[in-house]
Structure formats: structure tokens, C-alpha cells
Image (tube, rainbow, N blue to C red):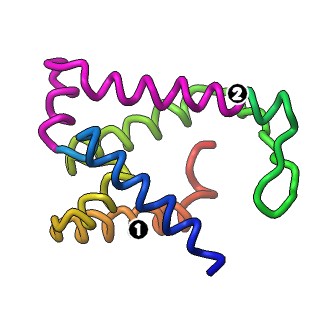
Amino acid sequence: MKGLRFILAGVLFGIVMSKSEAMSWYRIQEMFRFQSFHMFGIIGTAVITGIIIVYIIKKYNVKDSSGQEIVLRDKVEGWKRYLYGGVIFGLGWALTGACPGPMFVNIGYGYLSFIVVVCGALLGTYVYGVLKDKLPH
């Protein structure tokens, strides 16, 4: 029963993603062609929500579900890692039409071809783990 809250959070996330059409390939295509504000509005809302939550965590020393203090470490300076990572992430997003969250929502929605996409993402994550020490960080 400990995992029930995570399952409920996942279900809620899936409902929000599908109702906002954030998992729609059509909406993502519109965004990459700068034809609609829809996805930029969703991403902007997520960024503003994240800023507010980080502020609250830092201001009130919020603890996690196990009672441990949440520690937010400063980012390492440098632009190469963010540029290369962002380009690879964006190419994968444009190629598949989904970032990691919506990949699972699409499977839940019944688009079983996204199983291939999730397997590719897991393989990419594994390869990154193997090559991590040889990449520029």
C-alpha cells in the first residue's frame, strides 16, 4: 500500500497530460513550428509552478515524505552540458513527439507503439550511464 500514493500521482499526471493535450503529437508539432501558443503555455505554467515550489521548499525547509530535509544543490556552471543535453533531448522529443512523461501517458492511452519509444529511451539512459565518465561534464 506504500506505493498507492505514487500510483495515484501517476494517474493524476496522466489525466492532466491528456486533458491538457500535452501528450498530443499534433500539439507538439504546432509548438515546433511556432504555429500555436498551446504547448508554450503548458511549459510556461510548469516552469512557473516549479519556481514557486522551489521557493516554498527553500523558504520553509520542507521535508520529504520520509521526514528528510530536501536539499537543492546549486547547478554546476558551464554551458556545454546544458546545450548538448538540450539538443539531444529536443531532437528525441521532435523525433518521437513526446518527452518522457507523455511517453508513458501515450502507452496508457493505448498507443502501444510508444513501447518502442520507451525502450529506446531506457536504452539511451543505459548507454549514457555506461559512457558518462567519458562525456564532457
Between disc 1 and disc 2, the foreground one is 1
Q: Mark 1 or mark 2, which has the lower sequence index? A: 2
Q: Residue at x 25, y 66 (%)?
A: 107
Q: Quadrant of residue 27?
A: top left
Quick check: is 29 in the magenta stretch?
yes
- Image vertical order of residue 3 relative to residue 106, above or below: below
Magenta segment, which residues? 25-54
Q: Is residue 75 above or below residue 96?
A: above
Tell me what residue is drawn at x 22 percent, y 26 percent: 31
Q: Is residue 119 left or right of residue 95?
A: right
1 and 2 marks in contact (CB < 8 Å): no
Badge 2 marks a residue whose secondary structure is loop
Question: For the residue carrying disc 2, how many other residues have a C-alpha within 10 Å: few (<14), some (14-19), or many (20+)?
Answer: few
Residue type highlighted by circle 2: Glu
Classify residue 132 by image quadrant.
Answer: bottom right
- 7 vs 33: above or below: below
Magenta stretch: includes residue 47: yes
How far apart in space, not on screen, are marks 1 and 2 (Cα)? 27 Å
- Who is closer to the viewer here, 48 or 35? 48
In the image, residue 58 lies at what x, y percent?
Answer: 81, 31
Residue 26 spot, x, y in % from top left: 12, 38
Q: Where does the N terminus fall, quadrant-wise?
A: bottom right
| Direction from residue 41 to residue 130 in the image, left or right | right
**Disc marking residue 122:** 1
Crowd rating for badge 1 (residues with CA inside 10 Å; few <14, some 14–19, many 20+) = few
Residue underneath mark 2: 77
Q: Nearer the viewer, residue 57 or 34?
A: 57
